[in-house]
Each structure stands twice: as C-alpha cells, then as structure tokens.
C-alpha cells in the first residue's frame, strides 16, 4: 500500500524563502504615496523593521531563513502532506488528490509561518512591542504565539463584534500572553473618533488596522505587523510549497493543478509560488486561487491602484480590488473577506499566469463536511473553498477519465469555527448573492491616480 502520509525530516525544513519576483516576467508595480509617486523604504520605517522592508522590495530569488526562525518552525514543520485516498474513493475519481496540512501549527493555520519571521526581525531591530488587528482571530493568535517565542509584547486590536462572539480565539491570544482589546477602543485617536460618532460601533477590520497602525507609528519601541497581502508575508509562506514539492517528489508525483483559498493571497502564494518557479522554467502546472463568490476580488474586481485599508492610511497598491470601502457579506470564512489582494498574486493573475475561481458558501461547507467524513480533519471555512474547487476538478476527471494529480492547501483546521458548521447543519447558511451594486458603488470610489505621473 503506497503512503497516506508523506513526511519530511526536520533537517528538510527549507533553509531559504523563495521570492517569486525573481521569476516574474515584469517587475512588480511600485506602491504609490498620496502624491502618486512611488513610496521609498523610509515611508515604511516608522512601523516596519528595515529587514522586512528590504524583503518587501527584494528581487533576489532566495532569501536565507535565519536559524532562530527555523528553530521555531521545528515545533510543527515540516507539516505533513497527505494522499486523500478515502476522499478519492468517495468521489470515484481517477484523480490523485494530495493536501498539505498547515493546521498542524500551534495556532491551527499557516499564519505562524510569517508571524514567527516577523517577530524575529522586529526583535533583532530592538523592537519590544508589536501591534496588530484581527477579525476572527487567526492572525492575532499567530502573532501572539510568535511574540511569546521571541519575548515581544503583543497588543491585538480585535474587531469588537468578534471579540464578543468568538471568545475562544481571544482566550488563545491571552494564553500566549497577548493583550487583546475590543476595537474601537478609547486608547487611540482613531478609536475615540469612531466612538464619538457611534458609541455602540461593532468595529471593523478597517478601524482596527487604523488603531494598530496609529499606535505603532506614535511609539518608538512599537512596530506594526500584518498577516497577509504584503510581499514579505507571501515570501515567508513559501516554506509550504517548497516542502510540498519535496514530499511529492518522494512519491514520484507532480501536480497538474494546485488549489488554495485566497483572501489576501498569502497561503495561495505560499503553496503556489514554488511551483510557479517551475512554470516559469517551462513546466506545465495550473495554479488556482479560490475565493468566495460574495467577495470575488480576482474574478470580479478591477486591477487598479487602491488603498490597503478602509480609512486610506496605507500607500496605494496596484491590485485586484473591489474598492477599499466595500464591505463584503458576513460569510463564515472571515479570512477571505478582504477587499483587495496581494500585489504579486494580482499581477500574475493579470498576466494570465495563474487562475482564479469563485465559489458560493454552501457548496464550500458541503465539500468541507465530505472531507471531514472521509479524511477526518475538520477544515477551516476558508480551506473549504480550496477543497470545493479541488473536488469539482476531481469530478471532472471522473467524467473524462483523466488521472490528474491534484494538490490543495489545507490552510487550517476549523475547531474554532464549529458555530458555522452548526449553522450549515441547521440549514441556516446563506449563499449570498454576488453583491454587484455594492461593488460597483465601491469601485466608483477608487482613488484616482495618474499612473506614470
Ligand atoms: C487567514 C486565513 C486564510 C486567508 O488568508 P490568505 O492570506 O489568503 O492566506 C485562509 N485560510 C486560513 C485558515 C486562514 O486563517
């Protein structure tokens, strides 16, 4: 019987991150300041350490992973790669399905891969505190863990409605020693402004970002940390794809198609970019980002310069966007409710080098439940998107008889998302319609930039 679980030795944890910029046909579009001119590294130095700013703009193909970071990675990496034999059998497909399991990290998702690296570089730069925002809590808990590992205090601005509705992610953050505040707070200018207008504001990711950035910018000993979207975040996640390639090699396999859920693009970039290196060298492989039909950034957005946050504090980034003030419907895959996308993922998509599909909510839970009942692991609602798209491809293979090799990233487990599964079982989950009018209205408010000005 061939392997079900394909494991690597600790010594096989990658020693360098892979920078996709080195293999992109065109250089990435630069971030722009409010004046329409490219922003220099100085503009970011108030909230990020120089090592991360350098990674953000690097064109080097390989960037060495510092040994102290690999040492923490050893706590859960290399993560297992599985052959989904029981799922294949249930689908009666001739396709071979593999999945990389990033839920094996202490926080339960891929996010610690970058949190650990970011905490390390901040500590090396003499930073003692990090601020960040979190919605459902996946990112906040990852940074809480990483801060603890490197002796950095972490303050998390958690969207108030999640703070009240999702108490267990908050408990995790506190267990790892982070301070968690329900945002909007009365501790920042931004928070006080919102509270003055609406004392009962439920908060939003945009408001929480404003609070975290404001605090980091105003304190010498404090920096800010972001869990997705930025180039250096995707860079750190490439340990996923590098390990997966090695694991597939061990069983003589290579994927025809790679799937990953896509919110800000970090786990997609993490698993797909190392395969893109092969594609750039002429090998055939399809890379598919899977997004929610209700927040269809790549498949229905515009490729344009837009703000990364709701308020408009960040530089302008050229990306697929639904408009920075678009508020997506309240789907349960909280990690996929972002109006924009990574600049690198956006550019590769724009140039036709990667693909994207959008899937509605209910079929993603259908796929997740079938996965749990065959393979055992209960997936995060975000991961269910990749599972859906992969199952659809496997079913097409059943029609055509093609024995394709499919790989997807199981970006996290769903142990803190059982309320969403309960709703699915109770028939209370909605398939939100594509919010066409809201998107059109938000796109009409895109900032105007004279490109090349
Ligand atoms: C945050 C998250 C995502 C989406 O974020 P990306 O940056 O697009 O990877 C996907 N899956 C899980 C489990 C997450 O926590």
Image (cartoon, grey):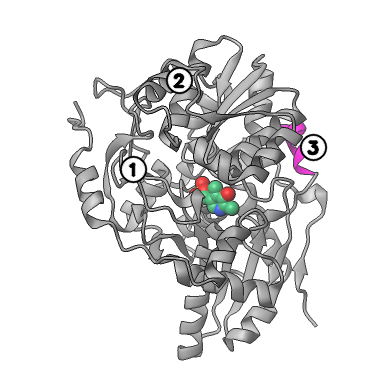
The secondary structure that most of the magenta stretch takes on is helix
Res 142 visible: yes
Give the quadrant of the C terminus: top left
Res 64 visible: no
Q: Which residue is mark 2?
A: 44
Quote the CA–CA distance across marks 3 and 2: 28 Å
Can you tell which mark lies on residue 319? 1
Contact, mark 1 vs mark 3 (Cβ under 8 Å): no
Question: Can you tell which quarter of the image residue 359 is in?
Answer: bottom left
**Image height check: is 364 above or below 25?**
below
Residue 4 percent location from the top left of the image: 76, 73
Q: Residue at x 49, y 31 (%)?
A: 56
Q: What is the magenta range?
A: 64-74
Quote the CA–CA distance across marks 1 and 3: 34 Å
Instruction: Count the labels in the image.
Output: 3
Q: Which residue is mark 3?
A: 71
* Residue 140 placement, left or right of 332: right
* Residue 104 placement, left or right of 442: right
Label 3 vs 2, first from the N-terminus:
2
């Amino acid at each position: 019987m061939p392997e079900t679980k394909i494991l690597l030795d600790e010594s096989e944890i990658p020693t360098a991150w892979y920078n996709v910029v080195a293999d992109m046909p065109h250089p990435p579009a630069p971030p722009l300041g409010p004046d329409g001119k490219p922003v220099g590294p100085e503009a970011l130095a108030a909230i990020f350490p120089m090592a991360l700013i350098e990674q953000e703009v690097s064109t080097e193909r390989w960037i060495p992973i510092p040994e102290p970071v690999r040492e923490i990675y050893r706590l859960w990496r290399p993560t297992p790669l599985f052959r989904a034999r029981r799922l294949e059998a249930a689908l009666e497909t001739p396709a071979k399905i593999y999945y990389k399991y990033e839920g094996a990290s202490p926080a339960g998702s891929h996010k610690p891969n970058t949190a650990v690296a970011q905490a390390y570089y901040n500590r090396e730069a003499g930073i003692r505190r990090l601020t960040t925002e979190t919605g459902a809590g996946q990112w906040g808990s990852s940074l809480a863990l990483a801060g603890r590992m490197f002796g950095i205090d972490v303050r998390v601005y958690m969207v108030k409605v999640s703070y009240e509705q999702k108490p267990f992610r908050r408990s995790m953050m506190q267990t790892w020693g982070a301070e968690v505040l329900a945002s909007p707070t009365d501790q920042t200018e931004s928070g006080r402004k919102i509270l003055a207008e609406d004392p009962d504001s439920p908060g939003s990711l945009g408001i929480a970002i404003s609070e975290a950035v404001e605090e980091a910018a105003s304190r010498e000993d404090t920096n800010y940390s972001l869990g997705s979207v930025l180039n250096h975040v995707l860079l750190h996640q490439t340990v996923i794809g590098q390990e997966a390639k090695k694991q597939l090699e061990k069983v003589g396999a290579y994927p025809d198609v790679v799937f990953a859920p896509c919110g800000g693009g970090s786990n997609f970039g993490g698993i797909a970019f190392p395969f893109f290196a092969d594609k750039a060298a002429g090998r055939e492989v399809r890379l598919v980002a899977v997004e929610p039909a209700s927040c269809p950034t790549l498949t229905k957005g515009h490729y344009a310069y837009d703000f990364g946050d709701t308020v408009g504090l960040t530089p302008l980034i050229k990306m697929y966007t639904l408009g920075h003030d678009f508020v997506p419907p309240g789907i349960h895959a909280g990690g996929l409710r972002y109006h924009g996308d990574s600049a690198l993922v956006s550019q590769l998509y724009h140039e036709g080098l990667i693909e994207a599909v959008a899937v509605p909510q209910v079929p993603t839970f259908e796929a997740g439940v079938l996965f749990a009942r065959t393979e055992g692991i209960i997936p995060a609602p975000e991961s269910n998107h990749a599972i859906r798209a992969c199952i659809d491809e496997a079913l097409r293979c059943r029609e055509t008889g093609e024995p394709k090799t499919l790989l997807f990233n199981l970006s996290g487990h769903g142990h803190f998302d059982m309320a969403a599964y309960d709703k699915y079982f109770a028939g209370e989950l909605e398939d939100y319609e594509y919010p066409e009018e809201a998107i059109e209205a938000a796109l009409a408010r895109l900032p105007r930039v004279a490109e090349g000005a």
